Image (spheres, helix red, strand yellow):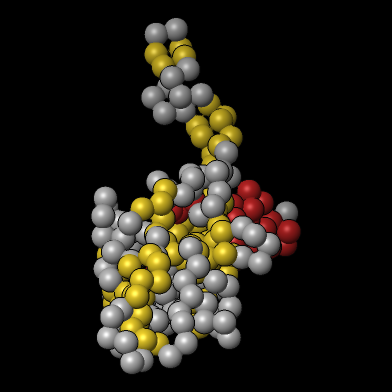
Amino acid sequence: MLRALWVSKTGLEAQDLALTTVSNNLANVSTTGFKKDRPVFEDLLYQIERQPGANSSADSRLPSGLQLGSGVRTAGTQKVFTTGSLQLTDQPLDVAINGRGFFQIAMPDGTISYTRDGTFHLNDEGVVVNVNGYPLEPQITVPEQTSNLTISTDGIVQATITGDPTPIDLGQIETVDFINPAGLQALGGNLFQETAASGAPQAGVPSEAGFGALQQGALENSNVEVVEELVKMITVQRSYEMNSKVVSAADQMLQFLTQNV
């Protein structure tokens, strides 16, 4: 009975973490470029009291043995990098990646972070920056008196100056991809960081060699499916209730023993 209490305890902890993951997904249902998480569980060590395949007599073997599990634990959480739906905004500095790839953001400490959030702005020097003021890498500077800004599907940025109909090139937006995007470390602020699990970033031109095309005047919505998360929430709630019933049952059995033995 004490063993059952500890096993059900691990189940309660696992379902609590699963609910945390679901709630975080639902909280970010409107976050631009957000990628949902899913928990990954694994069973704990087994106590082998009778070894499967051991001899039960001189001429026979145990077909299954006696193996007692010790519960469950959360092995990790995995980011699901499916592409979210695109929402048209008609803002010239809103850019979505339709497919694989990440924008590069230069951080204050000199490192590069990566994002799917294409909500860009201009700072006081005309540099294209993200919502926190960190510049896009490679840096794009928009000159004063720009009347029209164009970003092509392959990342070429051109500006038309008032009084001059000839567009000028401002540079090209490069995107990068990873062999294992799920291995990226989430930093918050819609930013990710390279890790040993993600592999090194592979730079490329948007819309070429498997990289997603850029869509100006659009943003990528979160890939969270509300109905799916609500179903997961119900499943987690029922699993939590079942584990709590095991705790109650073990408690009642222990109470019976203490009162009657």
Vertical comparison of 156 with 9: above or below: below
Would residue 90 be visible to someone looking at this image?
A: yes
Q: Nearer the viewer, residue 134 or 66?
A: 134
Residue 256 visible here: no
Q: Is residue 10 above or below residue 95?
A: above
Q: Quick one: 1 or 170, which is closer to the camera?
A: 170
Q: Nearer the viewer, residue 24 or 245?
A: 24
Residue in the image at 58% along x and 86% along y: 124
Residue 3 image position (x, y, % from top left): 63, 48
> Where residue 189 sits: x, y (%)?
56, 73
Tell me the quarter of the image containing the C terminus: bottom right
Q: Is residue 259 above or below residue 41?
A: below
Give me the residue at 54% from left, 71% from top.
135
Please state if 210 lies on the left or on the right of 118 as rendered. left
From this view, report whether residue 249 is shown above or below residue 51: below
Q: Image quadrant of residue 221? A: bottom left
